[in-house]
Image (spheres, coloured by chain):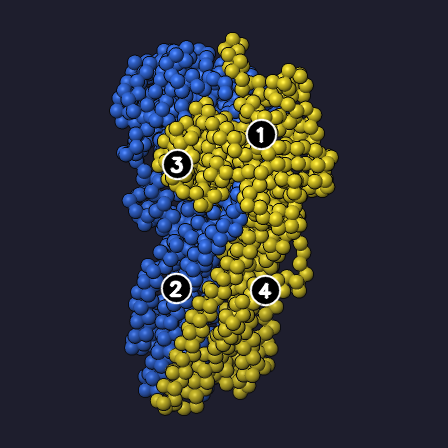
Chain colours: A yellow, B blue
């Protein structure tokens, strides 16, 4: 346990004091307190009951030695033993059912809170912390934490069983009992030594396994290439080598790990042998009864095994606690985007003003300095510039994904901070550079931002693009499943669906971070049509990568290091021969038909 | 073995008719180790019973009125010796099962991999790498766990079921009653338990998978969720998913809570004790034997307690073996045709009324006919799903058409020796796969042992030399997760260099790269131009310039050729073609 990868610490992680941590854990356990109480009760009873049968048996034996017991006594005794065993089963049953509920419910509320927290976190957070790690906190860490609950109960039950057994042994014959307890340190020492060894070989094994998995992944992914060049044999040799390495490492690990039980068992048996001899001698000397002697023998395992397990649980307890700390850190992480008001317009017109705005990411390097930009209602503005010029930052401030440091950003003349965030974004359409779709049908995805739109309306919108022919390229039209992250449809199709999503939303402000991936020319034409439809009905900010998009804008803003250095239309700027024409020659020239015509002659 | 594209004989024969016989045939191959494990398990259980016997002897002696120290010492020594031997047996059992498990993991993976190598490109094109990867790692690991701890614990602990039988028989045959009844009801209840548990655990797994995948998706797409102001809906959806997961988890917990063998054990202990005591009361057996018997019954707790987990382990392992077999038993539909036609290609490609479908009710290609002369460059264009890639895959016989013929140099493809075809036809896939090795090794992959000079000249032709030498370690640079990340255009040029080394007569280039800047575009243009010289080249492309200057352009639409001809022809005849060459 406890060999998790990808659980490296993040900067939002914090050290909770033990008191605070337990307090926070308790807020999740608190609604379950009745169940937990019953569980603890059954654990206590179970532990107590578990220690009783040897006592009873030893009493019986002493009776038996004293003389032949009568029928009634025997039936009574058997009834007691069966009753005890049945009670034990009943407690197990109650305990297991309740524990399953407690774990599942705590797990549910903890991961729901963690998920909700990560959904509400602003983009500054998501840009820094990888989604994979957040997911593992929401699933793996919550599960590790639940193990902590099971573990606590197990430890409690083991502890009770050991204590009760110890008590019984002490009352039966304290000399022998103390002598017996002397063996404990030996066992604990052995277990801790072994634990260190096991941890080391396990870690080696895990590391080797990770390497082997990587090679297997590669050799499997490479099969197609190998077939293409008829190189199956060489790729097989590589696979075989890594498979054999894996075999050797894991065999070693397995063999070392499998020595523990035989060794502890044998040690336990040696303790029993000593007990048999010295105990029997004590019986002959009249120090203890024969029944008590047998009681000690029966209790060896009941006493030692719980102690052994408690020792080995400790690492898991630590794992569980640090898992709890990681989930809580995610839930408690602070947001940076803060709204000052709750203005909820039905819709807005889409005028955008940046007044002397200053913005930098958390690392401190300024992106926008004293930035001013005024976008009229309904205007289509394309922003061009080299990577790092600040194009995306402008878009992300308008969508309120990031907080700026000073100056003003106004939507329809009102401070963007005074809006209700939900209402603000409801009238904003965004298409990201890699358009993101969710598992579901094409229709589900188009409806994502506007759940109320009807299928007829969607079909009507679709038909505005090339007569709706694009829908026919899907196997089942609007009902085609797009797969996880839209992976089952092509990049061009994903872009079309994302644009349709914005059309269905009919936003006041449209923000496009244009994709750079290549699209087949037929689909590209349809994307252009969809784009033009959106541009007609909203204020648009376009981070343009396509020549055709730049050309369709009302105004082009040329950015360099956060400053607007030129603006105008495509032909005006090109004629001026400034930074724009340099950008054109770097990024857009090869998209022009002139370039296509020249390509054949070079 | 059936038909195969490529065959390496696996070291020994296995039966693939069912997961059980398959695993058995692997086990039998390692019979010596497995036998040692079984002997260890039996020895372990047999010696485990000895302390109980000795307790009885000592007790009888203690209560006999004339206790004898020598008896105690003898008992203690017997316990010591036998338990050390038992420890050794247990070690042998554990080592045996562990080795069997690891050996079988190694061999099963080997066999699985060889089987993958033998599958056709059709198979690999349709099968996701992630899925195969999961089978080759996780599922094979489950097969390992089936042996250790699975069978190890189950077989090891089942032996303990028989000790009460032996000891009971020895003391008094009537005492067989309790253990026999217990054993019968034990097996019945385990069978019932496993049968009921299987659907529940599979639902637990699927509901977790559903929750997890939507969760990961929502966090990956958080920007889209926020922009559409859909956070609350996503949280609600998550709440529903986790509630479903919570409910099945509780259901599984309830099922485990009802685990009957525990109840049976309780009853067996009680009735066994009563039975022995009654016999004692009647004077049939001495009190010492009551102890012996009760100690033996206590051993029944091993098979009862371990079974909660171990049986699930075995059932998981069988399920995994079934998943592996389902891949290995997939029929291959192409054969190597080793005695087929073999000679250097000229590069003429003819399609005669070809139709093809991946599955029965959806046709991917319909009535395709065209002729390409040696050395021509053909651009295949059309929207996604129009059949471009499928068409290209028929050329190197990745698939065989359902109807019609594909001929190269006038000879139908099935008549060619597959090796001859594939070695002279090269495909550069849309998703270019490069190994996590040096750039040199990646280029030389197609021709093992190629010299540095050959590799460099290929890279030069592919316009890759300049950017490779600009890397800090040049041709020695390691690519991939553990090394340098290359852009799509750079990967494509390395793949081109890889193809140049084998000098194929027909090159199929599935080109979906896009150049972010005009200079890179220039380089890609030059590389593709060099690639198409002296060979027949098919380019599936989005690049207008490639389409514009191809010798022949095939416009695909919904599985048919909607237009075919030169640029000039199509500008005249096709409105949609004209449309893409018009500025908006």
Q: Residue at x 43, y 79 (%)?
A: A84
Residue A71 percent coordinates (x, y) = 35, 89
- Dot placed on the residue nearer the N-terminal end, 4 or 3: 4
Q: Secondary structure at mark 4?
A: helix
Q: Is residue A202 visible?
A: no
* Residue A499 left/right relative to B343: right
A527 up-or-down from A358: above or below: above
Spatial separation of the CA atoms under disc 3 and disc 1 = 26 Å
Q: Nearer the viewer, residue A448 or A412?
A: A412
Spatial separation of the CA atoms under disc 4 and disc 2 = 29 Å
- Dot placed on the residue nearer the N-terminal end, 3 or 1: 1
Q: Quadrant of residue B347?
A: top left
Which chain does tag 3 point to?
A: A
Residue A229 percent coordinates (x, y) = 43, 24
Spatial separation of the CA atoms under disc 4 and disc 3 = 50 Å
Residue A142 percent coordinates (x, y) = 54, 56
- Point out which mark residue A459 bears: 3
Spatial separation of the CA atoms under disc 4 and disc 1 = 51 Å
Q: Secondary structure at mark 2?
A: helix
Mark 2 highlights which residue? B255
Mark 4 highlights which residue? A27
Q: Nearer the viewer, residue A93 or A469?
A: A469
* Residue A351 left/right relative to A112: right
Which chain does tag 1 point to?
A: A
Q: Quadrant of residue A557?
A: top right
Which chain does tag 2 point to?
A: B
In the rendered image, the quadrant that contains the N terminus of chain B is top left
Mark 1 highlights which residue? A380
At label 1, counting other C-alpha atoms closer than 10 Å, the crowd grade (few under 14, some 14-19, many 20 or more) is many
């Amino acid at each position: 346990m406890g060999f998790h990868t990808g659980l490296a610490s993040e900067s939002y992680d914090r050290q909770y004091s033990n008191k605070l941590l337990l307090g926070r854990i308790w807020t999740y356990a608190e609604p379950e307190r009745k169940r937990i109480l019953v569980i603890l009760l059954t654990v206590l009873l179970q532990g107590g009951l578990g220690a009783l049968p040897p006592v009873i048996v030893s009493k019986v034996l002493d009776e038996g030695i004293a003389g032949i017991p009568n029928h009634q006594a025997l039936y009574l005794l058997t009834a007691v033993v069966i009753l005890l065993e049945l009670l034990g089963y009943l407690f197990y049953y109650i305990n297991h059912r309740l524990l399953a509920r407690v774990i599942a419910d705590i797990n549910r509320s903890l991961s729901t809170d963690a998920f909700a927290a990560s959904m509400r976190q602003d983009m500054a957070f998501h840009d820094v912390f990888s989604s994979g790690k957040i997911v593992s906190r929401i699933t793996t860490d919550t599960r590790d934490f639940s193990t902590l609950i099971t573990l606590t109960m197990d430890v409690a039950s083991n502890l009770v069983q050991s204590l009760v057994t110890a008590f019984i042994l002490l009352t039966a014959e304290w000399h022998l009992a103390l002598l017996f307890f002397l063996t404990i340190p030996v066992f604990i020492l052995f277990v801790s030594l072994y634990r260190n060894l096991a941890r080391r070989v396990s870690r080696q094994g895990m590391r080797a396994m990770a390497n082997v998995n990587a090679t297997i992944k590669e050799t499997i992914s490479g099969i197609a290439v190998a077939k293409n060049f008829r190189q199956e044999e060489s790729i097989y040799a590589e696979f075989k080598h890594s498979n054999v390495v894996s075999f050797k490492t894991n065999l070693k690990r397995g063999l070392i790990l499998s020595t523990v039980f035989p060794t502890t068992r044998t040690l336990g048996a040696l303790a029993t042998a000593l007990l048999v001899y010295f105990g029997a001698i004590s019986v002959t000397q009249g120090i203890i009864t024969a029944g008590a002697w047998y009681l000690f023998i029966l209790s060896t395992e009941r006493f030692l095994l719980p102690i052994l397990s408690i020792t080995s649980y400790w690492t898991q307890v630590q794992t569980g606690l640090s898992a709890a700390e990681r989930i809580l850190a995610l839930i408690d992480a602070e947001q940076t985007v803060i709204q000052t008001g709750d203005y909820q317009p039905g819709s807005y017109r889409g005028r955008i003003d940046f007044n002397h705005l200053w913005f930098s990411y958390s690392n401190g390097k300024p992106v926008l300095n004293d930035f001013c930009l005024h976008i009229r209602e309904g205007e289509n503005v394309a922003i061009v510039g080299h990577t790092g010029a600040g194009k995306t930052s402008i878009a992300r401030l308008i969508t309120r994904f990031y907080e700026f440091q000073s100056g003003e950003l106004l939507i329809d003349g009102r401070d963007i901070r005074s809006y209700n965030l939900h209402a603000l974004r409801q009238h904003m359409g965004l298409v990201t550079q890699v358009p993101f779709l969710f598992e579901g049908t094409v229709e589900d995805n188009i409806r994502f931002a506007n759940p109320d739109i009807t299928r007829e309306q969607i079909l009507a919108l679709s038909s505005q693009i090339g007569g709706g022919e694009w829908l026919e390229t899907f196997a089942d039209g609007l009902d085609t499943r797009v797969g996880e992250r839209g992976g089952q449809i092509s990049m061009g199709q994903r872009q079309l669906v994302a644009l349709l999503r914005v059309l269905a939303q009919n936003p006041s402000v449209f923000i496009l971070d244009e994709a750079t991936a290549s699209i087949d020319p037929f689909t590209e034409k349809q994307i252009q049509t969809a784009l033009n439809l959106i541009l007609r009905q909203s204020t648009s900010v376009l981070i343009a990568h396509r020549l055709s998009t730049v050309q369709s804008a009302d105004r082009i803003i040329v950015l360099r290091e956060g400053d607007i250095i030129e603006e105008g239309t495509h032909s005006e700027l090109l004629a001026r021969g400034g930074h724009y024409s340099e950008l054109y020659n770097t990024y857009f020239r090869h998209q022009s038909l002139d370039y296509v015509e020249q390509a054949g002659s070079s | 073995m059936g038909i195969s594209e490529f065959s390496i004989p696996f070291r020994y024969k296995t039966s693939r008719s069912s997961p059980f016989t398959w695993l058995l045939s692997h086990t039998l191959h390692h019979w010596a180790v497995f036998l040692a494990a079984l002997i260890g398990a039996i020895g372990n259980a047999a010696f485990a019973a000895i302390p109980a016997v000795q307790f009885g002897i000592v007790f009888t002696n203690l209560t006999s009125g004339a206790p004898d120290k020598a008896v105690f010492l003898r008992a203690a020594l017997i316990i010591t010796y036998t338990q050390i031997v038992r420890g050794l047996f247990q070690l042998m059992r554990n080592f045996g099962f562990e080795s069997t498990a690891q050996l079988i993991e190694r061999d099963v993976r080997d066999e699985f991999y060889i089987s993958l190598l033998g599958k056709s490109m059709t198979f690999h094109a349709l099968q996701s790498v992630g899925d195969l990867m999961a089978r080759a790692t996780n599922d094979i690991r489950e097969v390992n766990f089936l042996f250790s701890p699975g069978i190890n614990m189950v077989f090891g602990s089942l032996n303990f079921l028989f000790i009460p039988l032996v000891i009971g028989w020895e003391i008094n045959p009537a005492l067989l009653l309790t253990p026999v009844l217990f054993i019968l009801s034990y097996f019945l209840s385990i069978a019932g338990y496993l049968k009921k548990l299987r659907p529940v655990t599979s639902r637990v797994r699927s509901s977790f998978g559903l929750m997890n995948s939507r969760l990961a998706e929502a966090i990956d797409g958080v920007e889209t969720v926020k922009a559409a102001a859909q956070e609350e809906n996503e949280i609600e959806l998550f709440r529903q998913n986790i509630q479903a997961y919570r409910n099945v988890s509780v259901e599984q917990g309830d099922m485990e809570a009802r685990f009957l063998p525990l109840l049976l054990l309780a009853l067996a202990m009680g009735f066994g004790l009563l039975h022995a005591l009654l016999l004692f009361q009647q004077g049939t057996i001495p009190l010492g034997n009551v102890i012996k018997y009760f100690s033996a019954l206590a051993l029944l707790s091993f098979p009862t307690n371990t079974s909660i987990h171990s049986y699930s382990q075995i059932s998981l392992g069988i399920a995994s073996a079934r998943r592996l077999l389902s891949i290995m038993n997939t029929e291959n539909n192409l054969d190597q045709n080793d005695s087929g036609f073999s000679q250097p290609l000229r590069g003429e490609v003819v399609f005669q009324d070809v139709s093809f479908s991946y599955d029965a009710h959806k046709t991917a290609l319909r009535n395709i006919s065209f002729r390409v002369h040696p050395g021509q460059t053909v651009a295949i264009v059309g929207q996604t799903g129009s059949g471009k890639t499928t068409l290209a895959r028929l050329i190197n016989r990745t698939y065989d058409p359902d109807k019609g013929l594909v001929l190269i140099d006038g000879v139908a493809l099935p008549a060619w020796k597959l090796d001859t075809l594939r070695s002279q036809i090269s495909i550069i896939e849309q998703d270019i796969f490069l190994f996590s090795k040096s750039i040199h090794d990646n280029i030389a992959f197609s021709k093992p042992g190629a010299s540095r000079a050959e590799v460099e000249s290929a890279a030069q032709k592919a316009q890759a030399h300049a950017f490779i030498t600009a890397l800090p370690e040049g041709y020695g640079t390691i690519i991939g997760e553990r090394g340098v990340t290359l852009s799509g255009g750079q990967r494509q040029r390395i793949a081109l260099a890889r193809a140049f080394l084998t000098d194929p007569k027909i090159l199929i280039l599935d080109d979906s790269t896009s150049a972010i800047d005009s200079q890179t575009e220039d380089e890609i243009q030059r590389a593709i131009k060099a690639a198409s010289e002296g060979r027949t080249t098919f380019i599936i492309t989005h690049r207008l310039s490639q389409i514009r200057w191809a010798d022949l352009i095939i416009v695909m639409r919904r599985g048919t050729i909607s237009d075919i001809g030169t640029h000039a022809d199509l500008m005249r005849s096709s409105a949609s073609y004209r449309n893409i060459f018009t500025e908006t």
